Image: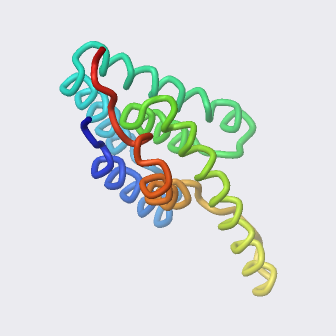
């Protein structure tokens, strides 16, 4: 089984840094992640692996479309999840969504508390840092979710 953890960690860490600094995630970054995921799937398991990565990208994209239409996440977050789905597959990206959302909730509570103490207006917390923090949590708790399956 091929492990895509290094690619996933690099992608989410770079996205987190960009999101913290500029509140944007560059299209070039997520495009590279998407292509890397599709290529890794194809390299490991041929057409089956490519299909698995493509399904993961579709699920990652679809999982954040509704929150995006409500303004809860940005377009970069949606595209980041598509790239993560290509690297992890559909089951992995759903796990990443659950863990990342929980961590984002904790991060947002901290940001709200600090903003209230400083009597500042609140702009919310970026989502990509929580996603990046969710990757090692999944790597420890569910490492099989981070691997490309072998062809049948």
Residue at image position (24%, 37%) is 2
Question: How many numbered marks does the figure carry?
Answer: 0
Taking the image as shown, residue 21 lies to the left or right of residue 8, namely: right
Taking the image as shown, residue 53 lies to the left or right of residue 16, namely: left
Q: Nearer the viewer, residue 108 or 98?
A: 98
> In the rendering, at what x and y percent does residue 24 appear?
49, 52
> In the rendering, at what x and y percent does residue 7 appear?
29, 47
Quick check: 42 above or below 147? above
Q: Nearer the viewer, residue 147 or 93?
A: 147
Quick check: 86 above or below 109? above
- Which of the 4 image quadrants contains residue 118? bottom right
For this orientation, the residue located farthest to the left is 43
Image quarter where the N terminus lies is top left
Q: How is the image coloured?
A: rainbow
Residue at image position (69%, 62%) is 124
> In the rendering, at what x and y percent does residue 145 appear?
44, 40
Residue at image position (56%, 59%) is 130
Image quarter where the C terminus lies is top left
- Which of the 4 image quadrants contains residue 105? bottom right
> In the rendering, at what x and y percent does residue 36 appear?
26, 35
Residue at image position (22%, 17%) is 46
Q: Nearer the viewer, residue 59 or 2?
A: 2
């Amino acid at each position: 089984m091929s492990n895509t953890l290094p690619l996933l960690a690099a992608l989410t860490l770079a996205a987190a840094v960009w999101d913290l600094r500029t509140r944007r995630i560059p299209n070039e970054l997520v495009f590279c992640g998407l292509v890397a995921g599709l290529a890794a799937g194809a390299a490991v398991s041929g057409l089956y692996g490519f299909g698995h990565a493509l399904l993961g990208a579709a699920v990652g994209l679809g999982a954040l479309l509704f929150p995006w239409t409500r303004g809860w996440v940005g377009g970069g977050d949606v595209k980041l999840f598509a790239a993560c789905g290509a690297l992890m597959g559909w089951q992995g990206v759903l796990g990443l969504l659950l863990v990342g959302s929980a961590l984002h909730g904790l991060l947002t509570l901290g940001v709200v508390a600090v903003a209230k103490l400083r009597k500042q207006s609140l702009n919310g917390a970026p989502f990509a840092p929580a996603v990046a923090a969710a990757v090692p949590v999944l790597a420890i708790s569910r490492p099989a979710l981070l691997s490309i399956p072998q062809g049948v």
